[in-house]
Amino acid sequence: MKITLDSKSLLLGFLGAGLMFTAISFKNSQDQVGGRYRTEVNATNTVVILDSETGNYIIAPEIRDFGKVQWVKGEFNKTFSTAIDNRKEAK
C-alpha cells in the first residue's frame, strides 16, 4: 500500500492542528486573577497570609530558627479601624 500526501492535505492538516492547539490553550480570565489567600514574604523574612474574602490574616515575624515561629492572628478591618498593631514584638 502506497501512501501519498499532497500539499493541500498537508497544509489543511497543519492548519487544523494549529487551530486545535490555539483553542485548547485559551484560558478563562477569571483563572488568572488569583485565589482567596494572598501570601507575601518581605526582605526580613516576615510572612503575611491574607484571606481576601474575610480580611483575616496571620503574620509570622522574622523566621530565625526552624520550629520557633509564633503566628499572630488578626482581622484587617478591626486592626485598621482601631489603628492598633497586634503583632507581638520579637524578644
Image (cartoon, rainbow, N blue to C red):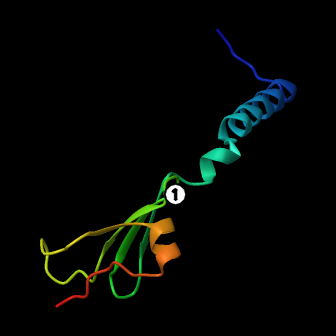
Q: Residue at x 77, y 34 (%)?
A: 19
Q: Is residue 34 left or right of residue 84?
A: right
Looking at the image, residue 63 lies above or below residue 33? below
| Residue at the top extreme, as displayed | 1
Q: Position of residue 25 (x, y in %)?
A: 66, 41
- State the quadrant of the N terminus: top right
The picture quadrant where one finds residue 47 is: bottom left
Image coordinates for residue 66, horizontal then vertical, percent = 14, 74
57 shown above or below 44: above
28 and 79: which one is in front?
Answer: 79
Q: For residue 3, what is the image quadrant?
A: top right
How busy is the neighbourhood of tag 1: few (under 14 within 10 Å), some, or many (20 plus)? few
Q: In the image, is 68 to the left or to the right of 49?
A: left
- Seen in the picture, residue 6 relative to 30 is either above or below; the reply is above
Q: Residue at x 61, y 46 (%)?
A: 31
Badge 1 amino acid: Ser
Which of 77 and 56 lies nearest the eye of the viewer? Answer: 77
Q: Is residue 55 left or right of residue 11?
A: left
| Residue 86 percent coordinates (x, y) | 34, 78
Quarter of the image with the C terminus in it: bottom left
Residue at left 34%, top 88%?
A: 44
Q: Across the whole image, how many numbered discs are drawn on residues?
A: 1
Residue extending furthest toward the bottom: 91
Residue of label 1: 52
